[in-house]
Image (spheres, rainbow, N blue to C red):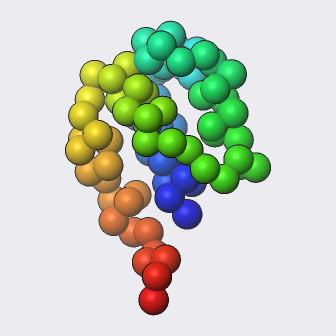
Amino acid sequence: MIKDAVVMRLQEILKERNMRVNELANLSGITPSTVYSMMDERRKEITINVIKKLCDGLDMTLGEFFSSPIFDELEQEIR
């Protein structure tokens, strides 16, 4: 599922940069509760607007964010 892949990618970046969720939220202009909620496995969707803000806070492009094997390995949803 794409949402799970987005969360995995964010966790990967946070680990690489030794950042906490609160720090990312502050840099992105998003409330920490929004980021934590997004990472909750019960929540099924995430908007591209939130991903863009997180990328802005991480000083990376959407292309850089999505350029990861995590997304290349997703199964096709339409057959």
Q: Is residue 60 left or right of residue 37?
A: left
> Is residue 12 in view?
no
Task: Quarter of the image for the N terminus: give it.
Answer: bottom right
Q: Position of residue 29 (x, y in %)?
A: 48, 13
Residue at 24 percent across and 34 percent down: it is 61
> Is residue 62 in view?
yes
Q: Position of residue 37 (x, y in %)?
A: 69, 33
79 or 65, which is in the foreground?
A: 79
Q: Is residue 47 left or right of residue 59?
A: right
48 or 71, which is in the foreground?
A: 48
The quarter of the picture where residue 54 lies is: top left
Q: Position of residue 75 (x, y in %)?
A: 46, 75
The quarter of the picture where residue 58 lies is: top left
Task: Quarter of the image for the C terminus: give it.
Answer: bottom left
Residue at 40 percent across and 58 percent down: it is 70
Tell which residue pokes out farthest to the right in this image: 42
23 or 18, which is in the foreground?
A: 23
Q: Position of residue 14 (x, y in %)?
A: 46, 29
Residue at 63 percent across and 39 percent down: it is 39
The quarter of the picture where residue 48 lies is: top left
Q: Is residue 74 above or below residue 51?
A: below
Q: Count numbered badges in the picture.
A: 0
Residue at 55 percent across and 53 percent down: it is 3
Tell which residue pokes out farthest to the bottom in this image: 79
